[in-house]
Amino acid sequence: MFIDEARILVKAGDGGNGCLAFRREKYVPRGGPSGGDGGRGGDVALVSDEHENTLLRFRFNPEHKAERGRHGEGSNRTGAEGHSVDVPVPVGTVVYDEATGERLFDFTAPGQRFTVARGGRGGRGNARFATSTHQAPTEHEPGHPGEEKRLRLELKLLADVGLVGFPNAGKSTLISRISAARPKIADYPFTTLEPHLGVVQLENFRSFVVADIPGLIEGAHLGHGLGVQFLRHIERTRLLAHLVDVSEASGRDPVHDFETVMQELAAFSEELARKPMIVVATKMDAAQNPGRVAPLRQLASSRGLAYFEISSVTGQGIEALKHAMAERVLGAPEGGL
Ligand SMILES: Nc1nc2c(ncn2[C@@H]2O[C@H](COP(=O)(O)OP(=O)(O)OP(=O)(O)O)[C@@H](O)[C@H]2O)c(=O)[nH]1
Ligand SMILES: [Mg+2]
């Protein structure tokens, strides 16, 4: 479930055909063969790119082809080479040959390049076939076909954003609203028993991964509730979104909930507690009492944390929150939001 997968077809460019031509010029009575070679076809390479987070773009774009080589021409002109194509993949992608199951490459760092399909050689033109006893050759070759392969790409997802908060704070509801993940949602604590990851999709194939983990309660670091065992799933995230239920129905104090969760995070690891965080007041549709909301807003501002108010029921604030997360984990988009 934590694996993102894509099947793609890669096709390198065919080589250009060799040319059949003879030199024909005034005052050159018997011009020799002059057909040039075809150009080489372009390669298809996968290149690891730190700006890619998921394999989502391949669902919409499963075929990648490089340009063919141009045909050779007369006057011994070799055809131009076809352009190669670089296909960006996230760091962590493992490439398998779909036909044989063979593991072909493992991208472990940004900027690695692996050629998955080689362009075909260009065919030889007839000029190449001339010998002293064979001065007017008519042989010329067609270009060689470019390689074609079906690949399976596999990526072990690492979450970019971790959702933390009390049980019942609305974490699972939020992830189901912003991604295709469908964890169980129910009106009681500890509905979520194991982490779920969801891929949040933005415009221009930008995407990031959110982890929904079980809620934390006071004493979680002592093993109360489901404990802190799941926090290791969000240790490597770049951002925490701390969800706090501000509705009347929660029956608890939002500021107290916030502080409790912060203490549990710190008890697990100081590093986790110091991660960039945004504070999210949830269930705004059911928060009639501004007296419950304002203190949380002030607390966030006094700690210098960005603060959002959302309702997963009405959709209030969801887009703004999504983009705030994206901006923090992916950086500002080219051309603005
Ligand atoms: N009115 C209202 N109810 C919400 C909203 N978001 C979630 N809920 C309800 O709150 C309850 C708990 O939601 P979950 O998403 O399961 O909460 P959770 O934080 O994942 O809970 P655990 O998995 O137990 O930690 C459910 O009954 C939801 O329908 C909201 O924006 N408005
Ligand atoms: Mg849940």
Image (cartoon, rainbow, N blue to C red):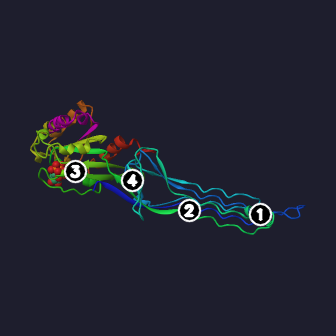
User: Hey, which residue is sitting farthest top in the picture?
Assistant: 302
**Which residue has dot 3 on it?**
195
**Which residue has dot 4 on it?**
94
Q: Is residue 278 above or below residue 35?
A: above
- Cα distance between the residues tagged 3 and 1: 70 Å
Q: Nearer the viewer, mark 4 or mark 3?
A: 4
Q: Is residue 241 above or below residue 46?
A: above
Q: Is residue 281 visible?
A: no
- Cα distance between the residues tagged 1 and 2: 27 Å
**Which residue has dot 2 on it?**
146
Magenta part mainly helix, strand or loop? helix
- Cα distance between the residues tagged 4 and 1: 48 Å
Where does the N terminus fall, quadrant-wise?
bottom left
**Which residue has dot 1 on it?**
130
Helix, strand or loop for disc 1? loop
The part of the image, by quadrant, that contains residue 125 is bottom right
Q: How many marks?
A: 4
User: Are the two marked residues, 4 and 1, in contact with CB atoms closer than 8 angstroms?
Assistant: no
User: Hey, which residue is sitting farthest bottom in the picture?
Assistant: 138
Which span of residues is magenta-colored? 257-279
Where residue 191 appears, as percent x and y from the top left, is: 15, 53
User: Are the two marked residues, 3 and 1, in contact with CB atoms closer than 8 angstroms?
Assistant: no
Helix, strand or loop for disc 3? loop
Label 2 CA crowd tier, 10 Å (few <14, some 14–19, many 20+): many
